[in-house]
Image (cartoon, rainbow, N blue to C red):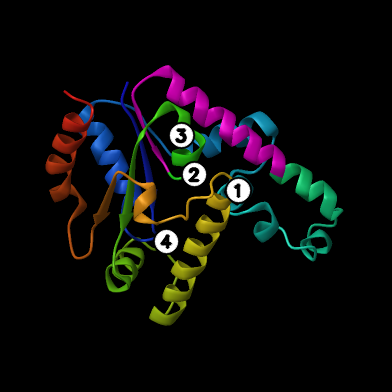
């Protein structure tokens, strides 16, 4: 069984890499589908789930947020735990169904016992900023310094979320089978060699 997890720095192109790799391999890629399923099964807004799904529970919900949403902090904490539990179950179910690529969501740690091929995608700050600005939604006009702060904050949140599942530091090379630097590269140009690596890794 080929299970491939992709952890990625924000703006590195990891999501695109996962989708393109899955297409070449002819297997499913799961990313936003996980968020959609969690939201549907729990009656939550998808944006709410997305905000929770890559942050530690403590980082995602400081005590002051209880006033902002007019609900007790303990209730918010309970909801975030439900999201984390649902996410883990969905990721495990996807992996049990067969070959797949799973992007983000600490799938590398959640599926550790299934021995997935764990990839980490990263890039220098210039490349991350450029990719984010090129793909920014209409109306978003962040300055370069604001974009850099956002990238660092999101990566910090991903690291904190990963700590809920593993003692291995997020992004540390020891925790992955292959680290891929996409700085200044077109993602599509990297896929043929990466697909060959995956096939070789799984002995095909």
Q: Would residue 60 be found to the left or right of residue 181 on screen?
A: right
Q: Earlier in the sequence, mark 3 or mark 4?
A: 3
Tell me the tag on residue 164. Answer: 1
Which portion, as a residue range, is magenta?
81-103
Quick check: marks 2 and 1 in contact, CB under 8 Å?
yes
Report the residue marked by disc 4.
137
Residue density around tag 1, few if under 14, some if 14–19, many if 20 or more, within 10 Å: some
Q: Secondary structure at mark 2?
A: loop
Question: Mark 3 sits on what residue?
Answer: 112
Residue at x-position 68% and y-position 52% = 57
Query: What residue is shown at x 59% (from left), y 43% (from top)?
Result: 46
Q: Which residue is mark 2?
A: 106
Q: Earlier in the sequence, mark 1 or mark 4?
A: 4
Percent x, y of residue 19: 30, 39
Q: Quadrant of the C terminus?
A: top left
Secondary structure under tag 4 reads loop
Q: Main secondary structure of the magenta part?
A: helix
Up/down of 44 relative to 154, above or below: above
> Nearer the observer, disc 3 or disc 2?
3
Image side of residue 17 versus residue 189, left or right: right
Q: Quadrant of residue 195?
A: top left
């Amino acid at each position: 069984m080929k299970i491939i997890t992709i952890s990625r720095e924000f703006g590195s192109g990891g999501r695109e890499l996962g989708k393109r790799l899955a297409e070449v391999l002819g297997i499913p890629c799961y990313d936003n589908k996980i968020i959609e399923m969690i939201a549907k099964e729990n009656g939550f807004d998808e944006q709410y789930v997305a905000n929770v799904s890559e942050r530690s529970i403590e980082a995602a919900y400081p005590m002051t947020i209880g006033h902002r949403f007019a609900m007790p902090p303990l209730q918010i904490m309970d909801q975030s735990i439900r999201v984390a539990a649902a996410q883990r179950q969905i990721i495990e179910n996807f992996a049990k169904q067969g070959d797949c690529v799973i992007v983000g969501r600490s799938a590398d740690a959640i599926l550790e016992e299934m021995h997935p091929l764990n990839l980490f995608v990263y890039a220098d700050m210039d490349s991350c900023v450029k990719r984010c600005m090129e793909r920014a939604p209409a109306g978003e006009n962040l300055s370069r310094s604001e974009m850099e702060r956002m990238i660092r904050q999101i990566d910090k949140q991903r690291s904190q979320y990963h700590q809920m599942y593993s003692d291995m530091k997020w992004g540390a090379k020891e925790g992955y089978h292959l680290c891929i630097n996409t700085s200044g590269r077109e993602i599509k140009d990297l896929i043929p060699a990466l697909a060959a690596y995956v096939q070789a890794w799984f002995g095909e």
